[in-house]
Amino acid sequence: MTSSLPRDVSAQTVLVTAGASGIGWAIARRFLTVGARVALCDVDANALDRACEEQPLLLAGVVDVSDETQVDAFVTAVKSELGPVDTLVNNAGIAGGCAPIATLGMEDWRRSFNVNVHGCFSFLRAVTPDMEQRGGGAVINISTGSVFTLPVNRLDYIASKWAVEGLTRGAAKELGPAGIRVNAIRPGLVDGPRMQAILQAQADSKGVPLAHIEAGFLDFISMRAKVQPHEIADLAVFLASPAARHITGQLIGVDGNIEWEQ
């Protein structure tokens, strides 16, 4: 085992799941700007092609994170091409069924947990042996500010993200002696197409204008503003760096202070 002191980010191999768009793409680009070797996976092959056209140095692969065979194969490919993973960013997640409890389908419930929780665990399990052997690493799980706001008609999503946070805290305790740090980021209302689609779905389900739903979210944010994807990326790079070497087991909000208004 080598020293548990984190490697400088510029010397790291970083793996970002669901990295071809949105927050994941912002995180991947940010790591590239500081010199890291970056691998990303996504289920959207077209988005991966666009990402590779913009950033030819990327290693990219089509992966369904709910399929552990695909997960293991991709981690093996990353190790072969770029070296063992130093930092894992578990960004993959889906919004869920967006339906009342009485009509929320079990398939939606299972799918939310398969992607949001099982996918997160599958990647964690796949990278842990090399991190333990090398004396450390960083795992950054993307959770959500919705664990505080508890939006209605999102029970599968909320429950799955609470599970991600439990996974984060439990893994941090178990893996801490090996020098592996595990933290979660709780994004708030992030500006971008994905959040707009989620808000629109809620507006449609309630029969109200989109502006009404958006204003309702902002009322719970003391800074009354959306978060930009690059702000999540900046925190991810910090958590992967030697400056965060004693930060683990934390659930960190980047949300303009949602909880204060609750």
Image (cartoon, grey):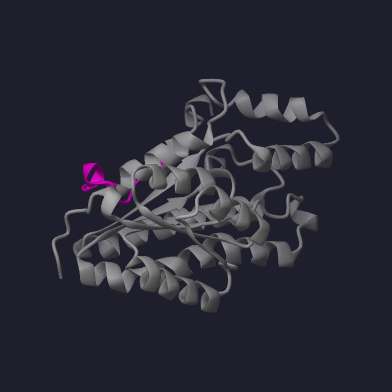
**Which picture quadrant has residue 62?**
bottom right
Q: Residue at x 40, y 47 (%)?
A: 32
For residue 193, which quarter of the picture?
A: top right
Q: Is residue 83 above or below residue 245?
A: below
Q: Is residue 251 visible?
A: no
The image shows residue 113 at horizontal and vertical percentages of 59, 63
- Residue 244 to residue 56: above or below: above
Q: Is residue 67 left or right of residue 99?
A: left
Q: Residue furthest top?
A: 223
From this viewpoint, is residue 103 visible? yes
- Which residue does the image show at 58% across and 37% down from the upper left? 149
> Residue 178 at x, y = what percent?
21, 65
In-front residue for pair 64/164: 64
Nearer-the-camera pick, 79 or 120: 79
- Left or right of residue 169, residue 189 in this image: right
Query: Which residue reaches farthest bottom?
Result: 69
- Work out whether 179 lies above or below 75: above
- Asked if residue 77 lies in the magenta stretch, the reply is no
Q: Residue 40 in the image: state x and y as whole percent.
A: 49, 58
Viewport quadrant of the C terminus: top right
What is the span of residues highlighted in magenta in the rendered image?
A: 241-252
Quarter containing the N terminus: bottom left
- Residue at 46% x, 49% y is 28
User: At 65% from the left edge and 67% from the top edge, which residue is drawn?
Assistant: 110
- In this rendering, would 37 be left or right of 102? left
Whether 247 is among the magenta residues is: yes
Q: Residue 45, position in %: x, y?
A: 65, 61
Looking at the image, how many numbered discs can be counted on the residues? 0
- Considering every residue shown, the one lying at the far right of the view is 207
